């Protein structure tokens, strides 16, 4: 049962072969069996899940079922869920029960989905390995000594290990695509503004975007159908029609123009990853696509620009965690300054503090123009690189990450960790959509192919990814851990 | 731009983070490496380039001036560390 | 040495929207603590701001009223600092691209001269909450109801040269925002708050002296007092060989003095940067034209019209146009009675006197503008004389009768103009006053004019005030002179 895609499970629910309650109980059982090893969930909402499943079964009996009704999902613990602990992977919010639902959570509830619980993540979505969580690291089900990627590592590991058929993640610099690649699943970061950010705890507001993580592009399409759309509560969400992403999955790819950014195949790229990506591209060629090399000349500056803009926004976004209205408060503060300083020093982990300090420093007097204004100018150049490339090609392809999943504890130095996001980070600066699909293995660890499109090209990305999954079986492979933990 | 201990301490104070001496020297080291990496930006020619604050060239939508929120004080204060008579409590603020 | 005072004002005006600038919570004053602080106002994790269209419209209306450039593109920035009444740890404001650009306001001084004060800019921002220091076991209580209330901060150029000019400027701003209806202008409830920048320099010197910023100056009177104190302090300091330091000072209305606020251990560094949760506000010409077409007649235009079209004195025109309520009342009285000068005299005389005695504002006047207009009309058409009119006014003030006509009727105050009736009363008075008649007859001719007053008084008394005084005067003189 836990080997099936959402699409297969939806069919089973529809035919009456399976009830949502049975499905939900099965996944709750899977979590109980396997998660003590993986640590992919921070909170499991078993009772709520069962009640939602029962309600979904009743709705279905009355003929009121939609495509997603009764399907269980896991939510990254960055989404506010009414009445359920929402920690953002931080001690700061360990005691925080959200008093409201994020817009995407509300939409998925309204669509009849069942929430299994809240998944582990790098604290405040700051990290590429899930080692920055207050709740401890998550393990990669393909290799328990490897990281699952981050920051949506819990979501990726849970889906890969069959603890949930699909999950929500968020992506500020690669946090959906990189863990999807490391865990051998499909993860889509939509165009900035496509999915509401309301209720998603902000890391870097001009970069954050929520997206689906699942076993196939087709599953992602069905989730995006519900998640996408304008939200009056989010000024940055876009008032633009939402197409049926599932409808165009089978459009033929003959004549598709693929660009390979030469900067994505340079130094630092693992040779096996490169081989897998080039083989994937040749699969497209066999479908009638044409391939050419393109250049994104400012790629090299994406990480520097990101590490100005994201920490600057974060330093301000995280000021609300001050121990006054919610969240961690230190014991016996001697005065107001002490209350602020100790509550925040105790509540935030090291990486979060590091980024708050960088952001505070780069925004401060005398540094603002040299760092922040400069980074925003470079950001425009980076976006222009993509817009120029999309004049010539339909999609860009390359690796999601320079290497397969690395070992837990392998990256001690923050900068070497940041460099992991070299292929994903520019996409957030430009606001374009990107998807990572499984495309092979190296040393038993999955490899992700990243496909990028221009703004609002999600339908095309899902179509291109789906066609690859019709021609290959990388996405159907399961880690041995699934069997071992059953 | 070299980062000094005083910069880190000033940022920590502005950001209201208690930082011990040991931590401060660790932060100086980490942040220096990060800023060295960031300094590559200075090599990009950005003459005549306007800063980009949002990835889409969208403009602000306006909300009708309507009261849509009801009093949810009790719900919101359930997650507050210290309240009394409906007020959030903090150590005495000296004006 | 001769000193010159240089003053600039930053006026924070709470805009009279129903809901907050970035949330749908109510802005009503005086609610239970934190009952009007919604998730967005509290800065709960994950919430986002959406801009109130009315706040934008009000800011633009103000800009148009002060002939300012309205920014085609304005941008919200975050001003970052920690304070318990600031829930998000930043205030959303407009640092670099404010919605209202340079403009100007005309102020009227005591000698009826006018002066133009330049506006540097005006920007939209959110208000903070309130800290309450009553004893919560030595703690401070935070009420965030006010957090997120829209503010328009109006920043003047340092164009004022005296406390009186500063007070006149503040009154002019008050008058404009209340005319526009964009604020209730209630200073006691904090709807209008003022920070004053004051410096002094030797007369003739071009460069400005070091300024002090005085906070918490929240009435017209306090502005004058705070400036007077501060100017004296700075001059004394300099003359004693000291130097003024740039600092923030607090006005203490109990003692009429300013005092230094405790200096922070470090200079503020607000780390302004564009708010990534809000997009640029873009206004097109059609929108501005629409708002311009909706603008009411503004105080300066009204004053001009009162003086030149209605023929009022500069003083009357200024007083009657100072507040929208006063102007509307006056204009209604004028519409009903048809005589601007009489309308002005009554509004500023009898009515204002009565309002002042009972500390009422004109909107709470027991005598409506229509009632007063009808009363003035009855004076103009000689139905009643001036003395009776005052009685009618008093009756209306105390609710004795619905209209001037009803009071005149009920009290029999209609003026007697029938010569025969007046002559009969005069004859009776003369008959009853042989001693006074004898005195009159024996007096020097030039003293008789004064002595006639006694007889006029007696006749008016006999008519219970209803006889036409001019007629009484003329007839009396004729009859008394006939006795000589």
Image (spheres, grey):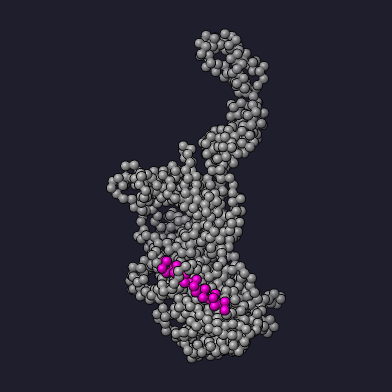
Question: Is C77 rendered above or below residue A268?
Answer: above
Q: Where's residue A27, x and y in %?
A: 58, 82
Q: Where's residue A396, x and y in %?
A: 55, 81
Residue C361 position by quadrant: top right
Most extreme residue toward the left is: C241
Between residues B57 and A145, which one lies in front from this camera angle? B57
Answer left or right for C260 relative to A201: left
Answer left or right for A63 relative to A427: right
Between residues A70 and C311, which one lies in front from this camera angle? C311
Between residues C300 and C397, which one lies in front from this camera angle? C300
Between residues A306 and C114, which one lies in front from this camera angle? C114
Question: Quick check: is A384 in the magenta stretch?
Answer: yes
Whether residue A174 is visible to the viewer of this picture, yes or no, is yes
Quarter holding the N terminus of chain A is: bottom right
Prevailing secondary structure class for the magenta stretch in the rendered image: helix
Question: Quick check: is A396 in the magenta stretch?
Answer: no
- Magenta residues span A368-392
Q: Where's residue A263, x and y in %?
A: 48, 81
Quarter holding the C terminus of chain A is: bottom right
Seen at 37% across and 74% down, the residue is B32
Whether residue C87 is visible to the viewer of this picture, yes or no, is no
Q: Where's residue C416, x and y in %?
A: 65, 22
Residue A226 position by quadrant: bottom right
Residue C421 position by quadrant: top right
Seen at 64% across and 70% down, the residue is A241
Seen at 48% across and 86% down, the residue is A404
Seen at 39% across and 67% down, the residue is A367
């Amino acid at each position: 049962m836990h080997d099936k895609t959402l699409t297969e499970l939806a069919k089973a629910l529809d035919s009456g072969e399976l009830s949502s309650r049975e499905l939900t109980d099965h996944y709750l059982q899977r979590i109980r069996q396997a998660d003590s090893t993986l640590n992919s969930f921070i909170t499991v909402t078993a009772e709520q899940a069962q009640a939602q499943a029962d309600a979904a079964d009743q709705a279905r009996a009355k003929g009121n079922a939609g495509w997603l009704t009764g399907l269980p999902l896991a939510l990254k613990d960055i989404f506010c869920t009414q009445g359920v602990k929402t920690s953002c992977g931080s001690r700061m919010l360990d005691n925080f029960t959200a008093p409201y639902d994020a817009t995407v959570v509300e939409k998925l509830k309204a669509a009849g989905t069942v929430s299994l619980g809240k998944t582990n993540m790098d604290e405040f979505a700051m990290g590429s390995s899930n080692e920055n969580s207050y709740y401890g690291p998550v393990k990669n089900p393909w290799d328990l000594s490897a990281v699952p990627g981050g920051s949506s590592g819990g979501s990726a590991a849970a889906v890969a290990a069959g603890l949930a058929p699909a999950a929500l993640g968020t992506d500020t610099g690669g946090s959906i695509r990189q863990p999807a690649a490391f865990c051998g699943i499909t993860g889509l970061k939509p165009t900035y503004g496509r999915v509401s950010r309301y209720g998603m705890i902000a890391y870097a507001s001009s970069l954050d975007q929520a997206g689906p993580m699942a076993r196939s592009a087709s599953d992602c399409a069905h989730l995006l159908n519900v998640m996408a759309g304008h939200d009056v509560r989010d000024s940055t969400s876009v008032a633009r029609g939402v197409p049926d992403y599932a409808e165009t999955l089978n459009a033929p790819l003959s004549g598709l123009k693929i660009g390979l950014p030469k900067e994505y195949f340079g130094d630092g790229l693992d040779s096996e990853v490169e081989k897998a990506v080039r083989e994937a591209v040749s699969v497209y060629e066999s479908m009638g696509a044409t391939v050419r090399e393109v250049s994104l000349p400012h790629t090299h500056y994406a990480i520097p620009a990101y590490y100005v803009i994201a920490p600057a926004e974060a330093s301000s976004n995280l000021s609300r965690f001050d121990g006054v209205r919610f969240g961690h408060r230190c014991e016996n503060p001697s005065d107001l300054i002490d209350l602020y300083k100790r509550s925040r020093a105790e509540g935030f982990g090291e990486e979060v503090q590091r980024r708050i300090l960088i952001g505070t420093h780069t925004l401060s007097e005398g540094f603002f123009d040299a760092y922040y204004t400069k980074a925003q100018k470079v950001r425009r150049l980076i976006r222009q690189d993509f817009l120029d490339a999309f004049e010539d090609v339909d999609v860009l392809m390359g690796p999601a990450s320079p290497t397969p999943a690395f070992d837990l504890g392998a990256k001690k130095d923050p900068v070497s960790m940041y460099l992991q996001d070299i292929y994903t980070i520019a996409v957030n600066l430009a606001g374009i959509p990107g998807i990572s699909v499984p495309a092979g293995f190296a040393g038993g660890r999955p490899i992700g192919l990243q496909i990028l499109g221009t703004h609002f090209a999600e339908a095309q990305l899902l179509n291109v990814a789906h066609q690859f999954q019709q021609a290959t079986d990388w996405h159907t492979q399961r880690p041995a851990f699934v069997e071992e933990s059953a | 731009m070299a980062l000094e201990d005083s910069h880190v301490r000033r940022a920590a104070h502005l950001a209201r983070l208690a930082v011990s001496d040991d931590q401060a020297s660790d932060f100086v080291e980490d942040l220096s490496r990060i800023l060295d990496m960031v300094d590559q930006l200075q090599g990009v020619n950005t003459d005549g380039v306007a800063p980009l604050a949002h990835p889409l060239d969208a403009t602000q939508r306006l909300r009708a001036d309507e009261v849509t929120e009801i009093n949810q004080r009790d719900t919101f204060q359930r997650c507050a560390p210290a309240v009394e008579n409906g007020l959030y409590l903090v150590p005495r603020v000296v004006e | 040495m001769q000193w010159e005072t240089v003053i600039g004002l930053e006026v924070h005006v709470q805009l009279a929207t129903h809901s907050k600038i970035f949330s749908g919570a109510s802005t009503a004053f005086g609610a239970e603590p934190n009952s009007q602080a919604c998730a967005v106002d509290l800065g709960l994790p994950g919430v986002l701001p959406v801009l109130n269209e009315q706040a934008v419209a009000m800011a633009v209306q103000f800009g148009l009223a002060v002939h300012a450039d309205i920014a085609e593109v304005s941008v919200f920035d975050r001003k970052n600092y920690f304070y318990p009444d600031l829930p998000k740890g930043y205030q959303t404001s407009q640092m670099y691209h404010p919605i209202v650009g340079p403009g100007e306001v005309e102020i009227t001084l005591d000698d009826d001269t006018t002066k133009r004060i330049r506006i540097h800019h005006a920007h939209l921002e959110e208000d903070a909450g309130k800290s309450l220091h009553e004893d919560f076991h030595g703690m401070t209580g935070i009420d965030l109801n006010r957090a997120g209330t829209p503010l328009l901060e109006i920043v003047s150029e340092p164009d004022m040269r005296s406390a009186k000019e500063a007070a006149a400027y503040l009154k002019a701003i008050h008058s404009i925002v209340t005319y526009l209806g964009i604020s209730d202008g209630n200073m006691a409830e904090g709807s209008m708050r003022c920070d004053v920048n004051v410096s002094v320099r030797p007369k003739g010197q071009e460069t400005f002296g070091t300024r002090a910023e005085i906070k918490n100056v929240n009435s017209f009177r306090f502005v004058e007092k705070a400036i007077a104190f501060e100017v004296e302090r700075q001059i004394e300091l300099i003359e004693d060989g000291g130097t003024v330091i740039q600092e923030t000072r607090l006005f203490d209305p109990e003692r009429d003095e300013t005092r230094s606020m405790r200096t922070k251990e470090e200079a503020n560094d607000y780390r302004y940067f564009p708010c990534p949760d809000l997009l640029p506000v873009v206004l097109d010409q059609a929108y501005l034209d629409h708002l311009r077409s909706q603008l009411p007649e503004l105080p300066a235009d009204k004053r001009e019209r009162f003086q030149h079209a209605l023929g009022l004195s500069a003083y009357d025109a200024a007083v009657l146009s100072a507040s929208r309520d006063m102007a509307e009342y006056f204009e209604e009285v004028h519409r009903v009675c048809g005589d601007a000068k009489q309308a002005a005299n009554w509004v500023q005389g009898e009515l204002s006197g009565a309002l002042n005695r009972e500390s009422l504002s004109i909107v709470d006047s027991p005598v409506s503008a229509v009632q007063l207009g009808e009363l003035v009309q009855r004076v103009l058409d000689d139905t009643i004389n001036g003395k009776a009119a005052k009685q009618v006014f008093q009756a209306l003030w105390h609710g004795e009768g619905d209209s001037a006509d009803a009071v005149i009727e009920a009290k029999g105050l209609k003026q007697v103009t029938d010569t025969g009736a007046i002559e009969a009363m005069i004859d009776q008075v003369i008959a009853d006053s042989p001693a006074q008649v004898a005195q009159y007859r024996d007096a020097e001719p030039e003293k008789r004019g004064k002595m006639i007053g006694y007889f006029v008084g007696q006749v008016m008394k006999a008519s219970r005030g209803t006889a036409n005084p001019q007629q009484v005067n003329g007839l009396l003189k004729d009859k008394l002179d006939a006795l000589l």
